Amino acid sequence: MFAHRTAVHLEQLSLETEVRAITRMDGLRAATRRLFAVADREEIRFVERCVAFARQWHLTTPARVVSRLGNGWLYPVAAAILFLSSFQSAARCIIAAGGSLALAFTVYPPLKRFLARRRPCDYDRSLIDATKSLDRYACPSGHAMTAAAFGVPMIFAAPLAAAPVVIVGCVIVSWSRLALGHHYLSDLVIGTLLGAIIASLVAAFVV
């Protein structure tokens, strides 16, 4: 009898703890939605200007090409070129980049679903482009995160040689996402920081 009561009590405590955790998570999610609602209104004008500039100067097609390469095609080619080059610590850079990407894409999907930020092209339908996004939500930017996670290990290996190339590459990839109306600037900043932090931790041990 005592054992049965103890088991029931423990089950009730477990259920209450789970309910409190869900309530806190729902509260945090609601606060995040409110924050993004304000941020979307503040940032949408900048995205509209970027899209308008790209369309006016016929840069939408180059942005589409860069964005599609950033879907994943770019990085195996870049890794092969790096491996065949005389770049210092090429093999360790590739290993670190692979580890960084693996960790980043473990964190990225649940974080993106939790934040659930609408894309600019969903906020303003005039921004919709023929190039479809890979998933529903905007924050963080997977393209920006991937570019940083792949590139940062190279900066660890050869800062002076690699830093300009990596920074320019990250900027171009991020610009393409703005030009297509797929991301806000803050999505790109958060994605870049996420990829860079993960890659820095990995590269510190590998490169």
Image: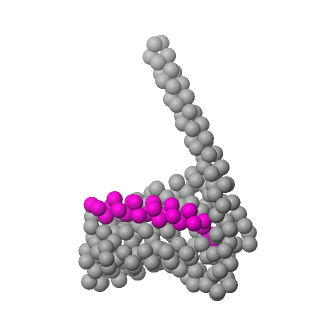
Question: Compared with residue 35, is residue 55 higher up or lower down, i.e. above or below?
Answer: below
Give percent across and percent down for residue 195: 43, 63
Across and down, in percent, residue 96 comes to 32, 66
The relative height of residue 18 versus residue 1 in the rendered view (above or below) is below
- For the question of whether residue 66 can be seen, the reply is yes
31 to 193, vertically: above or below: above
Q: Looking at the rendering, which quadrant does residue 95 occupy?
A: bottom left
Query: Is residue 23 on the magenta stretch?
Result: no
Q: Look at the image and give the residue range highlighted in magenta.
A: 181-205
- The colour scheme of the drawn protein is one colour
Image quadrant where one finds the C terminus:
bottom left
- Spot occupied by residue 71 in the image (x, y as percentages of width and height): 51, 73
Q: Is residue 99 left or right of residue 188?
A: left
Give the left or right position of residue 148, taking residue 156 as reference: right
- Seen from the viewer's position, the closer of residues 93 and 105 is 93
Query: Looking at the picture, does residue 141 appear above or below residue 88?
Result: above
Answer with the quarter of the image where residue 80 lies: bottom left
* Residue in the picture at 66% in, 55% down: 38
Q: Residue at x 64, y 86 (%)?
A: 57
Residue shown at 67%/65% (left/top)? 44
Q: Nearer the viewer, residue 23 or 1?
A: 23
**Magenta part, dominant SS:** helix
In the picture, measured across the screen, residue 89 lies left or right of residue 1, that is: left
Residue 193 on the magenta span: yes
- Residue in the picture at 28% in, 80% down: 87
In front of the other: 104 or 121: 121
- Residue 160: image x %, image y %? 31, 77
Q: Quick one: which residue is furthest to the top in this view?
A: 1
